[in-house]
């Protein structure tokens, strides 16, 4: 299924028109004429059971968005899309091209950055476990990329701390980065989102991203989904039908 990317945030729900507008600003006219795109979202999900004891029903919870494409047509962007998207990920212009080499695997991070402009803190987490193994996270607030990291085992480890981009070559014998193995990067991203380590078991850390992805989909009763793009055109959002959920399982990529 390629790379799965989720947008995760805390607090009040982002409405579908807001999500579509952020997506429109990112994609503009750089979409294939046969492209379809949907958004899938979750109700509040408690990711740290300890915080639920505070009496606040939203304590320790996040909401999750998945910008989903048809599993048969995962690349919805045109050949020139990367030239536009590299300038929208939140890196300084002089670093945009170099940063794209490390972080261009998750173009929906550009949407996450725009969603953070309204005052919410937003994380984007990604995982690929098939042909290319990869784990990454990015933290955004106020429209700025505050911190991010991506790890490709036996290849590279890149980080951004808000000022400096660092890229290290990684060999088969090199130790794991501080975040751990690729599946653990999602948990590290949520630690930064909460500004505090979450109370998770080793299994929960390893399976966090797939668990959050499933929370955006049926049979979860509170999962919602809406069409954003049909046949290369942004449309008035409309609910996903039962057959659409089976089609829209992949994350859009370049």
Image (tube, rainbow, N blue to C red):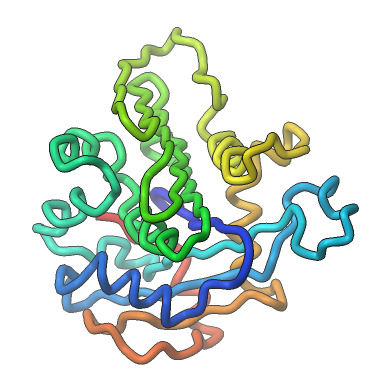
Depicted 193 relative to depicted 183: above or below? below
Look at 31% across and 45% down and name the residue there: 105
Residue 79 falls left or right of residue 68? left
Instruction: Point out the image quarter for the C terminus.
Output: bottom left
- Quarter-wise, where is residue 50 in the image? top right
Could you tell whether 182 is left or right of 11 in the image?
left
Q: Position of residue 87 (x, y in %)?
A: 19, 50
Counting labels gives 0
Task: Please determine whether, in this image, residue 145 is positioned above or below residue 20.
Answer: above
The picture places residue 166, in percent across and down from the top left corner, at 31, 22
Image-based side of 75 in relation to 19, left or right:
left
Which residue shows up at 47% across the image and 65% down it? 249
Q: Is residue 164 above or below residue 217?
A: above
Q: State the residue in front, 78 or 107.
A: 107
Residue 115 lies left or right of residue 184; in this view the side is left
Name the foreground residue: 195 vs 236. 195
Q: Quadrant of the N terminus?
A: bottom left
Q: Quadrant of residue 247?
A: bottom left
């Amino acid at each position: 299924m390629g790379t799965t990317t989720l947008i995760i945030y805390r607090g009040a729900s982002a409405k579908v028109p807001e999500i579509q507008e952020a997506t429109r600003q990112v994609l503009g006219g750089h979409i294939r004429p046969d492209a379809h795109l949907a958004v899938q979202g979750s109700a509040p999900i408690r990711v740290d059971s300890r915080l639920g004891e505070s009496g606040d029903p939203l304590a320790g919870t996040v909401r999750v968005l998945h910008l989903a494409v048809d599993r048969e047509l995962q690349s919805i962007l045109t050949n020139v899309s990367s030239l536009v998207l590299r300038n929208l990920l939140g890196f300084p212009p002089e670093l945009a091209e170099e940063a794209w080499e490390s972080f261009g695997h998750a173009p929906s991070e550009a949407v996450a950055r725009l969603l953070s402009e309204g005052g919410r803190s937003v994380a984007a987490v990604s995982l690929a476990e098939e042909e290319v193994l990869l784990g990454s996270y990015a933290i955004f607030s106020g429209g700025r990329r505050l911190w991010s990291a991506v790890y490709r085992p036996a290849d590279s480890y890149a980080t951004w701390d808000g000022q400096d981009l660092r890229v290290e070559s990684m060999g088969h014998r090199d130790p794991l980065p501080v975040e751990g193995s690729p599946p653990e990067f999602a948990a590290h991203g949520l630690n930064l989102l909460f500004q505090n380590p979450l109370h998770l078991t080793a299994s929960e850390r390893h399976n966090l991203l797939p668990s959050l992805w499933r929370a955006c989909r049926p049979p979860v009763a509170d999962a919602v989904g809406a069409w954003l793009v049909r046949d290369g055109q942004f449309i008035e959002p409309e609910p996903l039908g039962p057959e659409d959920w089976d089609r829209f399982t992949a994350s859009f990529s370049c």
